[in-house]
Image: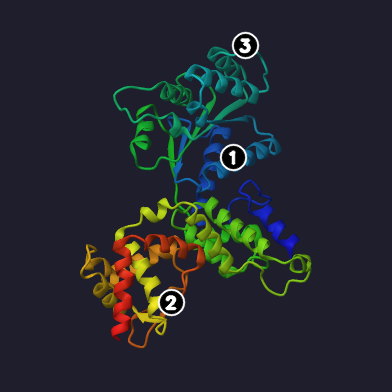
Amino acid sequence: AGERLRICQRHLHSQFSTSPVVHESLASLMENKNRITGFLWKLVMGTTSETSASLYICGQPGTGKTTLTKECCEQVRKEAIEKETDIHPSFCYLNGSTFSGTGTPEAVWRQFLKSMLESLGRRTTFVSEDNVKREIANRNFSLMVVVLDEIDMLLSTNMNRISRGESIIQKFLSWASGEEGLRFAFIGISNAVNNTKAHRIHELGKIGKTLEFAAYTRDDLLNIVKDRVGTRVVGEDALKMAATKAAKSGDARKVLSFTLSAVSVCLESLSKDEAAETSLKQPLVKPKHVHKALMSSVVKDNDIVKNLPRSQKALLCVMKGLYQYHAHKSEWELIDLSTFCRKVVQHTSVTEDGFSPSSLKDNLEKLVDVAFLPQDTIQAGVSATGDRTIRVGRILAEVNRVVDKLCEESFYENILETIRTINRLH
C-alpha cells in the first residue's frame, strides 16, 4: 500500500507526464491544439495568409497554455523532419519573468538574442541584434519560431509611453510581420485576460491570431487527475472532491496539488503493517483524506478566517452552536435553518438578509468550498416537503480550533450564548 501511494505521489507532481496533455474529453483543449498546430503548419508549408506570423495565447494560470504550446511545437518539429519539408522550423523558448529579475532590459534582450542563436545551432560570444537577424536571413530553408511565455511580465499598464520591456515585444512583432524580411514567427503566452495588459499588446504591433484558453471545468479537472492516478488507489469520490475544490479557479495544478496532499495524508496515517500490505481490496485515499488535506492548507493561514464576510463567520458560529447545544437535531430543512439563523442574529449588527434561504445556501457552499464545512453539509436530495436538507455535523478538529478562536470575540460569543439560551427554553 505504501509503495502504491508513493507511485501516486510521483505521478501527481505537475512536472510528471508520460502521456499527452490533452485528454480526449477536453474538447476545448483539443480545439486549441488543432489551432496551434494549424498555425505552425501553415508557416512551415508557406501557405499562411495572415499579415503577421504571430499568435497571442492567453488564459488564466493553470489552463495548459505553456504545456500544450510546447507539445504542439515539438510535434510539428518532429513531423517536419519525418515529412522532409522544405522549411525546417527551429524553436526558441523564452520567459518574460526574466525581465522581472535584477537584470537590466538591455541584459535581458542580450540573453534573449543569445538563446535565439543557440536554438539555431550557433554558440558565439559575439551577440547582437544584427547578428541574430543575419543568421535568420541567411537560412533560406529555416523558420525561426520564438515562444515567449509570461509575456504579460513585459507589458505595462501605462498607456502613455512604451516601456523598455514592451520595446522587446515590438521588435518581435515587427519581425513577425515581415517588416525585416525575415522568416520569423512569434508566439506570446500570457495570463492576462480582458484587462489593460491584454489590450496593451495589440497596440504594440500586428497580431495575426489570438487564442484564449478557457478555465477547466470540474469534469475537465477530474479527467486530468484520473489520467495521472486512475481510481484504484485514490477513490473516485476523493478525486471528485479535489476536482470540485479546484474548479473554483479552473487551475489544473491545484487539483494535482490537492490530490497529492491527500495521498500524503493517507500515507502518513498508515501503520507499518498497513504500509507493507500488497493486496488492494478498495481505494486507499478517501474523501476524508482530501478533506483533511484541504483543511490543513486552510488553517495554515488565519488571514482566510479574518477575511471571511461577517455573515459567514456568524454562520460558522451558528453551525458550531447547533452541534454543541442542539445535537438532537442533525438535519435541518433549509428554510427552517434560515429562520433559526435570522432569529439568532436579529439583535446583532449582521443583517438578517444574509440568512435568507438563498443567501444561506450561498454562504454554506462557500464555506464548503474552503473546507470549513464537510462536503456533505448540503444534501444532494431534498426533504419530503421539497426543501433542501442541511446536515449539521461535527466541525473537524483543525477547523474547530479556528472557530474556537473566533468565538472568543464577544460578538460571536454572544451568538453561541443565544443558541444555548434558545435550546434551554425549548
Disc 1 residue type? Answer: Lys
Q: Position of residue 267 (x, y in %)?
A: 68, 61
Q: Which mark is residue 70?
A: 1
Quadrant holding the N terminus: bottom right
Q: Which mark is residue 126?
A: 3
CA separation in Å, label 2 and label 1: 41 Å
Q: Mark 2 packing: few (<14 Cα in 10 Å), some, or many (20+)?
A: few
Ranked by sequence position, the earlier of labels 2 and 3 is 3
Q: Using the image, determine if residue 189 lies above or below residue 403.
A: above
Judged from the image, the secondary structure of the residue bearing numbered disc 1 is: helix
Q: Using the image, determine if residue 98 lies above or below residue 4.
A: above
Judged from the image, the secondary structure of the residue bearing numbered disc 2 is: strand
Residue at x-position 52% and y-position 44%: 65
Ranked by sequence position, the earlier of labels 3 and 1 is 1
CA separation in Å, label 3 and label 1: 28 Å
Ranked by sequence position, the earlier of labels 2 and 1 is 1
CA separation in Å, label 2 and label 3: 67 Å
Q: Position of residue 88 (x, y in %)?
A: 64, 30
Disc 2 residue type? Answer: Ala
Marks 2 and 3 in Cβ contact (< 8 Å) = no
Query: Is residue 391 visible from the viewing direction of this image?
Result: no
Quadrant holding the C terminus: bottom left
